[in-house]
């Protein structure tokens, strides 16, 4: 089936160009010119992906994202001429899956869109019962378990592991992790994140989840590698 895409963009020329481009790629495209139309669309239909501008007439893109995240986990890519790191961090902390600053090339857009769709497909596959010995996430308890044995994570440790797991295979910067997990700005003298990573490694090893590895990436941050996904 054709992937269904919701495009919410107030620039009529860009909206038309993107609609034409994705239709040529075989997508089923629904377009909206403002946030209010986008809000109606996300409540009326289900989409495989949402491409969302931040600066919109009516309801802005971040508010629309907040509303969507209260009900659905549909992959969302934000687009904006706002290129500051803080704007990207704000988008991620409010539930965006990716952020693409304007102007952008169609080649980069396609690569990121395809990556999001692949990740969503893998996530759906992981929703089926997983084999004995796999790591189970419990959002209500804010903990993980393996074979019924809980790791005893703190809330911060759980948020960190869940964030790394949501972006498994991708290196996440310390700046992003401090903002999205610890809710404070990163400074080079702050070792809080490193302490949480050390504790996570110890607790995961204690329940026999050695297949889940949190690796440091020099000059960047941390990456989660799960041997069960390979």
Image (tube, rainbow, N blue to C red):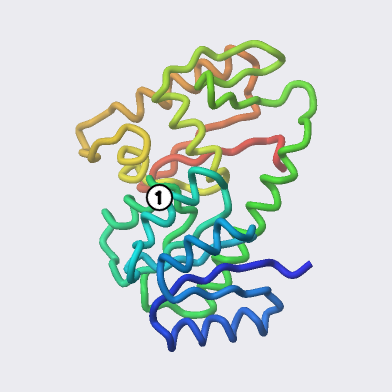
Image spot of residue 118 (x, y percent) = 66, 57
User: Total label count?
Assistant: 1
Position above or below: 41 against 193: below
Q: Crowding near pointer 1: few (<14 within 10 Å), some, many (20+)?
A: some
Rendered residue at 49%/51% (across/down): 68
Taking the image as shown, residue 153 lies to the left or right of residue 218, namely right
Which SS class for mark 1?
helix
Q: Give whichever of 188, 56 is nearer the camera.
A: 56
Rendered residue at 20%/33% (across/down): 189
Taking the image as shown, residue 87 lies to the left or right of residue 208, namely left
Q: Say which quarter of the image contains residue 82.
A: bottom left
Taking the image as shown, residue 67 lies to the left or right of residue 143, namely left
Q: Quadrant of the C terminus?
A: top right
Q: Say which quarter of the image contains residue 2.
A: bottom right
Image spot of residue 111 (x, y percent) = 57, 69
Q: Give whichever of 96, 188 is nearer the camera.
A: 96
Residue that mark 1 sits on: 92
Rendered residue at 65%/25% (across/down): 136
Image spot of residue 80 (x, y percent) = 35, 69
Image spot of residue 113 (x, y percent) = 57, 66
Rendered residue at 52%/49% (across/down): 170
Position above or below: 63 against 127: below
Position above or below: 35 against 149: below
Q: Quadrant of the N terminus?
A: bottom right
Taking the image as shown, residue 131 lies to the left or right of residue 31, namely right
Position above or below: 208 against 63: above
């Amino acid at each position: 089936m054709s992937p269904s895409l919701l495009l919410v963009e107030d620039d009529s020329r860009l909206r038309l160009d993107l609609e034409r481009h994705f239709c040529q790629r075989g997508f089923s495209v629904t377009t909206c010119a403002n946030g209010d139309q986008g809000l109606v669309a996300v409540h009326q239909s289900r989409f495989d992906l949402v491409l969302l501008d931040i600066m919109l007439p009516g309801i802005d893109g971040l508010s629309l994202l907040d509303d969507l995240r209260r009900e659905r986990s549909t992959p969302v890519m934000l687009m904006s001429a706002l290129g500051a790191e803080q704007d990207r961090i704000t988008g991620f902390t409010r539930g965006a899956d990716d952020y693409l600053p304007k102007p952008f090339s169609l080649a980069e857009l396609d690569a990121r869109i395809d990556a999001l769709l692949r990740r969503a497909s893998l996530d759906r596959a992981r929703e089926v019962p997983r084999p004995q010995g796999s790591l189970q996430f419990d959002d209500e308890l804010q903990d993980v378990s393996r074979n019924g044995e809980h790791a005893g994570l703190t809330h911060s440790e759980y948020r960190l592991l869940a964030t790394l797991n949501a972006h498994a295979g991708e290196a996440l910067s310390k700046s992003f992790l401090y903002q999205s997990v610890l809710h404070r700005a990163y400074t080079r003298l702050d070792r809080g994140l490193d302490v949480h990573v050390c504790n996570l490694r110890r607790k995961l090893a204690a329940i026999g989840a050695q297949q889940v590895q949190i690796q440091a990436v020099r000059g960047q941050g941390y990456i989660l590698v799960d041997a069960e996904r390979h």
